[in-house]
Structure formats: C-alpha cells, structure tokens
Image: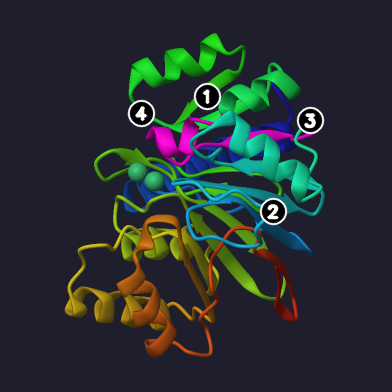
Amino acid sequence: MAPRSARLLLASALIGLVTAALTWALLGRSNPVRPGPARPSGGSVRELRVSVIVDNNPGPPALKSAWGFSALVEADGVKILFDSGPDPDVLKRNARELGVDLSDVDLVVISHHHGDHVGGLPYLARVSPGLLVYVPSGADPAVLRSIRSLGLEVTELDDPTELSNGVWTTGSMWGPPAEQGLIVNVSGLGAVLITGCAHPKVELMAQRAAEIADERLYAVLGGFHLGSATEARLEGIARVFRSLGVEFVAPLHCSGERARSFFREAMPSAYGDGHMGLALTFDRSGVSVEG
Ligand SMILES: [Zn+2]
Ligand SMILES: [Zn+2]
C-alpha cells in the first residue's frame, strides 16, 4: 500500500481534476462559442496611405478617369491594391503617372466581382504574376475562373479576416452581389474603412467595420452607391457615421453627385473631395490630404 502522504497527494490531484472538469463544463455551458465576427488581434499600423489610382471623378488632366475604382493602400509598408478599375491600360497609365510601382504589391483585395473593379487585373497579373487576390465568398464563379486564368491566386473570404497586421476585411456581406470592405486600424486614431461600391449598404458596412475593429471608425471612403438614395436615407447614413465617431468622409466612384453634395453640406468639417489622384495619409494626428 502507498504511504499516507502519497495517497493524500493522489486524492487531492483527483479532486483538482474533477473541479477543473466541472468548471470547464459549467463555463462551457454559460459561455457558448458563438459564430460571428472574429475579434481583432489588437494589431494596428502607425501610418496608412491611400492613393486613388482609378476613379470616375476626374483629377489632374494627366490621369485618365474611367468608370470604376482602384486604390493603392500602404499600411506600414504593406502594399495592398484594393480593386483594379475597369481596364488594364487605365490602371497601368495612372500608376505610371502617379509614380506608383505595382510590381511589388503584396496582395490584392477585390471588393466585389463587377467589371469596373476587376477589369484592371490583367495588368497586375503581367507585372506581378502569382499574386494573391482576396475576393468575398459568393462572388461569381465565372469571374473567379477568369482571374485564375490570368495566373493569379484567388482566395475566397467569408468571415472578417486579418490580412496583415492591423488590416482586416469586413468579410463577405450580401448586396447583391457579395462584397467586402477593407478596414485598417490606425494606432491612436481609429479605423479607416474603404469600400468599392458598398452594395450591402455603406452604413451597414461602417457598423460592421467599427465592430470588427473594436475602435472608433475615423474615416469612410470609396464608392457608396447612393445614386438613387432618398434624403432620409442620406440623413440616416450621416447619423450612423456621426454615432460611430467618423471625422472624415470621402465619397468616390458610384456615390453620386447628390450624395457627394449632401455630405459636403451635412458633414462639412469631415468632407473630403474624392477624385482621381487623391492621396491620403492617416496617422495618430489625423488625416492629411494631397492631390
Ligand atoms: Zn463599381
Ligand atoms: Zn458594383
């Protein structure tokens, strides 16, 4: 028979095991794992630069405007192309005029499968073959096949996902079509949301971005798709933006002239005129606007 001290040790170890099992079972029951947006890692970037390479709102004459959207996003040196505009030649020409080198882009994020957002990809495939392209799950399989046929690697994303430190996608949201926005968490400032067309509604994308970042949403820019929005809807969007702490709004692409002038008047200190060649730098002190 084991000595008394050994029996006591064994007994206390058994009690410990039973207690741990009970605690695990009880906690497991009271805190079920719920599906939903993944929580951020706490990652953020010191500096975010966004350069509009393709947009239908004209800028300097040397830059060709075209219906569509593309922006280069540089998050502490990680180069992300967000959408590619409608045409490889427009992407090539504007990148050259802006002095932007797309041969060393780290990854591509496509908001949704419409041609005015994926049409420039053949140029990217030429200068940076094999590049990883993130698309929202639910995108048109025929478009995904054509992107793969260019020699690019396609990854479909369903849930909010951190793509690099402090850089997130909203995950796939339904418009139609399926669409994702890009979120960058800027240290000491808050989150910046970039949208392609915002078919799932820009206010819902903004709310989701704030939830994922778990931060104040500092800025929203990109296509808002508000050509036929009523005044009441526009006012509702401004209310949502204000409630999330938005201090910078730049409607681009398909936002529509009426929506652009609405935000210019409703949020004058926050309004940024979105157009070809716009270059924004975000850091803890706020945003600086060039172009
Ligand atoms: Zn579009
Ligand atoms: Zn679209």
Left or right: residue 77 compared with residue 165: right
Expressed as whole percent of the image width and height from the top left, the position of residue 70 reads: 56, 46
Expressed as whole percent of the image width and height from the top left, the position of residue 220 reads: 50, 67
Q: Amino acid at mark 3?
A: Ser
Q: Is residue 128 visible?
A: no
**Vertically, is 253 above or below 46?**
above
The reply to whether callout 4 and callout 1 are in contact (CB within 8 Å) is: no
C-alpha separation, residue under disc 3 versus residue under disc 2: 21 Å
Expressed as whole percent of the image width and height from the top left, the position of residue 61 reads: 65, 58
The residue that mark 1 highlights is: 155
Residue appearing at x 74%, y 34% in the figure: 106
Q: Nearer the viewer, residue 81 or 38?
A: 81
For mark 1, does the 10 Å Cα neighbourhood hold few (<14), some (14 to 19), or many (20 or more) residues? some
Which numbered disc, 3 or 2, marks the residue closer to the eye? 2
Q: Based on the displayed image, in which of its 4 quarters is residue 265 positioned?
A: bottom left
Expressed as whole percent of the image width and height from the top left, the position of residue 247 reads: 54, 81
- Residue 117 in magenta stretch: yes
C-alpha separation, residue under disc 2 versus residue under disc 1: 34 Å
Q: Amino acid at mark 4?
A: Ala
- Residue 198 in magenta stretch: no
| Residue extent of the magenta highlight | 104-120
Residue appearing at x 36%, y 53% in the figure: 198
Q: Nearer the viewer, residue 61 or 226?
A: 61
The residue that mark 3 highlights is: 103
The residue that mark 2 highlights is: 62
What numbered label is drawn on residue 139? 4
Q: Amino acid at mark 2?
A: Ala
Mark 2 lies on a secondary structure that is: loop
